[in-house]
Image: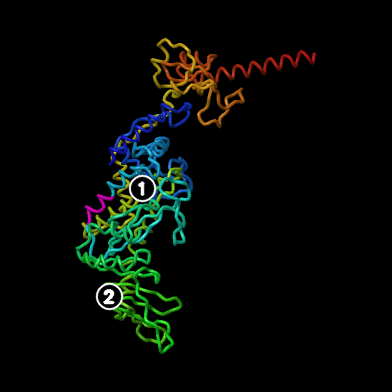
């Protein structure tokens, strides 16, 4: 998987650099092809950013003593990290409009998601109790999948919806499916199709399913029973095929906590009376109650329906998994929805890896320590890279070729097929500053653009005096500053002479 990501990232980066007019100071112009080992180190830094939170992204590479984070700059430079984050790519497939044959809303990351789903299911088999529920990836922008949907949670109310099947014992995500909008469904409904697709590998194995009112339907429970799978969940009273409760002819006043049950075949419809009626449909439980071990204000023991107790215990698996992914999530600024989805599932893969580690170890470490060790191990896959940017701006780089070979100025030309009326310019490596914050002595301009370059050195140079200084002086920056100081002093002396002559 990492080799494919590295291949697509290199392809996209090279195409972008060749087809885009970039200035010399742009960090994208210093792109070098990556490999699988460097991508492991890149994702190791992503994991480390989820552990250590700072105010700004640049603070991870800050030299200030307050932050003191040597781990990140020791692995790769900030510019290299930004380049990898910008050019990260997963597929070369072209977008097919909705409604045409072969349309795939997730074409950008479908290969990654398919491979990840296969690894999730083949490395772990769930226990008896499983749960299906929805999770949310926060997103408010546009995307090819569908319009952002509204969630029922307080956080991340708008985003992309994911349906997950998790093991209720440890919240391991066994299967998932991203909601991609309305499409062709069977007569039994979209909720039925979604549940059966997620449950397809586990039918006929005696599992017990816990779901919410979105999936609960009599037709689903009947088909699951035929496949030796029982289920329990809250149900909506307007569900097709749900029998109505018999009316109370004696009009007995119902108190809070009373239970009404009705059996239809092998399913039980249980209603709990309260401020709001709660309805359960189950093929696992009856209307029996058991002691919870607690007491109310009067000292009496508290009993609870077995269906309510087990549904509350096993239904929260997806919520626990989603909450832990959110805690470790890195909120980097990303303008593409598929990168947001990718990093969400990458964190979910880390969570599943930790659960597999716990299952195979008698005395496991906690999740925070596991992520810390995982970040260090992934970052160690690639040797540290030296800063590749502005190699031509360094005074000692290629000094032999720069000072001895023959060089000629030439006009900066546009790439083939990208000609524009405006002349193409580059920053002069001699008289320009890197950041634009430091002014050149005697010159108020912070950036100096030139239309002339040295093709052999691949740098932009002003004709006078920068071209000569660059090819004759070893430390051309210092020589340029001295030249400017001499010119400034000459101007001051001439000004003093003119003032004295005028005074006389």
- Number of disc labels: 2
Return the residue nearer the eye: 358 or 400: 358
Q: Main secondary structure of the magenta part?
A: helix
Q: Is residue 340 magenta?
A: no
Q: Is residue 122 magenta?
A: yes
Q: Which residues are magenta?
A: 117-124
| For residue 115, side relative to residue 500 (left or right) | left
Q: Quadrant of residue 191?
A: bottom left
Q: Name the residue tied to disc 2.
A: 285
| For residue 453, side relative to residue 171 (left or right) | right
Q: Name the residue tied to disc 1.
A: 47
Q: Mark 1 vs mark 2: which is more N-terminal? A: 1
Q: Is residue 103 above or below residue 412?
A: below
Residue 490 in the image: x percent, y percent? 64, 15
Q: Are marks 1 and 2 in contact (CB under 8 Å)?
A: no
Q: Quadrant of the N terminus?
A: top left
Return the residue nearer the eye: 376 or 301: 301
Mark pair 1, 2: CA separation: 43 Å
Q: Quadrant of residue 76?
A: top left
Residue 486 in the image: x percent, y percent? 59, 17
| For residue 376, side relative to residue 337 (left or right) | left
Return the residue nearer the eye: 269 or 364: 269
């Amino acid at each position: 998987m990492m080799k494919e990501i590295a291949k697509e990232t290199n392809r996209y980066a090279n195409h972008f650099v060749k087809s885009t007019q970039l200035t010399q100071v742009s960090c994208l112009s210093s792109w070098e092809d990556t490999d699988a080992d460097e991508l492991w180190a890149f994702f190791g830094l992503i994991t480390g950013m989820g552990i250590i939170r700072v105010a700004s992204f640049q603070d991870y590479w800050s030299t200030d003593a307050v932050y003191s984070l040597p781990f990140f700059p020791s692995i790769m430079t900030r510019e290299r990290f930004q380049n990898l984050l910008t050019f990260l790519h997963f597929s070369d497939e072209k977008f097919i409009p909705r409604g045409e044959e072969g349309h795939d809303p997730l074409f950008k990351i479908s290969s990654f998601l398919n491979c990840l789903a296969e690894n999730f299911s083949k490395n772990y088999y769930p226990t008896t109790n499983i749960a299906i529920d929805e999770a949310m990836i926060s997103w408010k922008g546009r995307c090819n999948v569908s319009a952002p949907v509204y969630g029922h949670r307080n956080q991340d109310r708008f985003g992309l919806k994911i349906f997950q099947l998790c093991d209720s014992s440890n919240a391991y995500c066994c299967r998932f499916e991203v909601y991609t909008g309305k499409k062709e469904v069977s007569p039994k409904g979209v909720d039925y199709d979604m549940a059966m697709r997620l449950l397809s590998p586990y039918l006929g194995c005696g599992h017990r399913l816990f779901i919410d009112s979105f999936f609960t339907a009599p037709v689903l429970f009947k088909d699951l029973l035929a496949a030796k799978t029982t289920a329990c969940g809250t149900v909506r009273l307007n569900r097709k095929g749900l029998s109505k409760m018999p009316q109370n002819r004696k009009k007995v006043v119902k108190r809070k906590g009373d239970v009404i049950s009705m059996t239809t075949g092998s399913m039980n419809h249980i209603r709990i009376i309260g401020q709001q009626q709660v309805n359960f449909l189950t093929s696992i439980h009856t209307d029996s109650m058991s002691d919870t071990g607690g007491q109310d204000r009067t000292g009496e023991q508290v009993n609870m329906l077995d269906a309510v107790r087990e549904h509350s215990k096993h239904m929260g698996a997806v919520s626990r998994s989603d909450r832990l992914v959110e805690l470790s999530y890195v909120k980097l600024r990303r303008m593409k929805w598929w990168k947001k989805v990718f990093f969400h599932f990458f964190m979910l893969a880390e969570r599943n890896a930790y659960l597999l580690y716990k299952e195979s170890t008698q005395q496991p470490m906690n999740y925070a320590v596991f992520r810390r060790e995982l970040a260090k191990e992934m970052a160690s896959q690639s040797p540290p890279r030296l800063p590749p940017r502005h190699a031509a701006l360094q005074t000692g780089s290629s000094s032999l070729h720069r000072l001895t070979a023959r060089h000629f100025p030439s006009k900066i030309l546009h790439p083939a097929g990208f000609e524009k009326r405006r002349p193409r310019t580059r920053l002069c490596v001699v008289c320009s500053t890197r950041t634009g914050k430091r002014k050149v002595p005697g010159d108020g301009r912070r950036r100096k653009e030139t239309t002339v370059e040295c093709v052999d050195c691949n740098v932009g140079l002003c004709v006078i005096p920068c071209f000569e200084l660059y090819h004759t002086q070893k430390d051309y920056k210092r020589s340029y500053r001295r030249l400017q100081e001499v010119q400034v002093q000459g101007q001051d002396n001439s000004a003093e002479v003119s003032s004295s002559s005028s005074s006389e």
